[in-house]
Image (cartoon, rainbow, N blue to C red):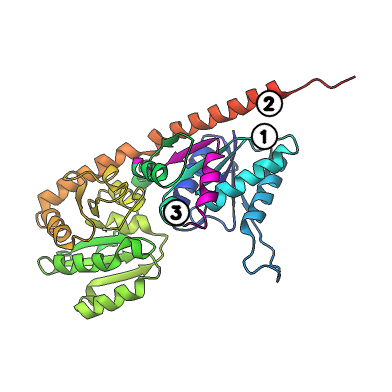
Amino acid sequence: MKIAIVCYPTFGGSGVVATELGLELARLGHEVHFITYSQPVRLALLNPNVHYHEVNVPEYPLFHYQPYELALSSKLVDMVKLYKIELLHVHYAIPHAYAGYMAKQMLKNEGIEIPMITTLHGTDITLVGNHPHYKPAVSFSINKSDVVTSVSQSLKDDTYKLFNIKRDIHVIPNFIELDKNREFHGPCQRSLIAKKEERIITHISNFRKVKRIPDIIRIFYKIQQQIPAKLLMVGDGPEKEKAELLCQDLGILEKVIFFGNSNEIDKILSNSDLFLLPSETESFGLAALEAMAWGVPVISSNSGGLPEVNFEGVSGYLSTVGNIDEMAENALKILKEDTVLAQFKENALSVAKKFDIKHILPIYIDIYEKAIKKYTKKSKHSTKPHDD
């Protein structure tokens, strides 16, 4: 198959999932074209089946905001025609599904029809998409997609609740590459981060308000009062400076390391003992799954799709949003005894194996093949003989 993948190229979960999906498809021999405004952060271009096409948005003084959707839809049309792409897979309803639909219409005008798969990841539905200014466009884009998928049952339910959706939504969970994780044999960095007796607690995110960064600091504050511990804060965003100030106010700044965005997530997680994710909401919780794939148990809220990933009392514990006292207590249940921690680590990895890409990829491939086959049949039926 020849597949175009449209995604955000950032450190966020949707971009990571889209990139890893495309790379795995390429390893199986499919031709994959990434189309976005910059190279995705996890995209390796060494595979001959992987192609990257940058969307350039010319700047005109006429526009207060440059029309990315217009540039993207035009780029899609050009790439489909040039490389004979058979299917579009767009991640995020807006602007990608919206631009994808416009591209499909332009292609149809030239006698080219291909299917579009739209994957919903979260904020395109629950935050941005639900804004009154965008809601009609989001509903339209989803309903005009040939196949719609969501990364959790929770997100599927929210989509039906918030929008007038007439299409079926298929739940395909996010995934992790267990084989790739197990192949990592980097040097042990633990002694550079923490003392031998200290537990290492980690959080990774984009430091937005929805992640409840102050809760993480306060949970850790309670933990370190009872056991020696270090907190690793990985990522960057609007709440980072406030977090640093809170650490200073609580007198724990020397026990917290702020890494910023990092390409060494595997090294960090491989040396972690616990992962904190007390978010207001998570459509899935990919960061939690990545931690669990390294055998790191998770303390999280029970919001959104998190209960579908973090199993209560098995891979970690779930609490209501904002209940930092209970989260700290549950963290200490895991961390205090070596034998208990070892069991939770084993459990976390076992749960993560359920989300191995080997189990998820065939579901996507099946959807792709059925969508392409449907359009091929439609094309054959619509072909009319030329008049002599």
In the foreground, 31 or 59: 59
Are the residues at dot 2 and dot 1 in contact (C-beta closer than 8 Å)? yes
Cα separation between marks 2 and 1: 8 Å
The mark nearer the N terminus, 1 or 3, is 1
Q: Badge 3 local density, few (<14 within 10 Å), some, or many (20+)?
A: some
Magenta-drawn segment: 132-153
- Depth check, mark 1 against mark 3: the one in front is 3
Viewer-nearest of discs 3 and 2: 3
Residue 104 left/right relative to 257: right
Quadrant where the image shows the C terminus: top right
Q: Nearer the viewer, residue 47 or 168?
A: 168
Does dot 2 land on a helix, a strand or a loop?
Answer: helix
Which quadrant of the rendered structure holds the N terminus?
Answer: top right
The residue to which callout 1 is attached is 113
The x and y percentages for residue 130 are: 44, 54
**Front-lying residue, 331 or 150:** 150
The residue under label 3 is: 130
Q: Residue at x 40, y 68 (%)?
A: 237
Q: Quadrant of residue 100?
A: top right
Query: Viewed as shown, does residue 371 lie left or right of 314?
Result: right
Residue 176: x, y in percent?
37, 44
Q: Is residue 341 magenta?
A: no
Given contact means CB atoms under 8 Å apart, are the residues at marks 1 and 3 in contact?
Answer: no
The local crowd at label 1, few if under 14, some if 14 to 19, many if 20 or more residues have their Cα within 10 Å, is: some
x then y, percent, for residue 276:
25, 58
Residue denoted by label 2? 379
Magenta span contains residue 139: yes
What's the CA distance linking mark 1 and mark 3?
A: 30 Å
- In this rendering, would 94 be left or right of 269? right
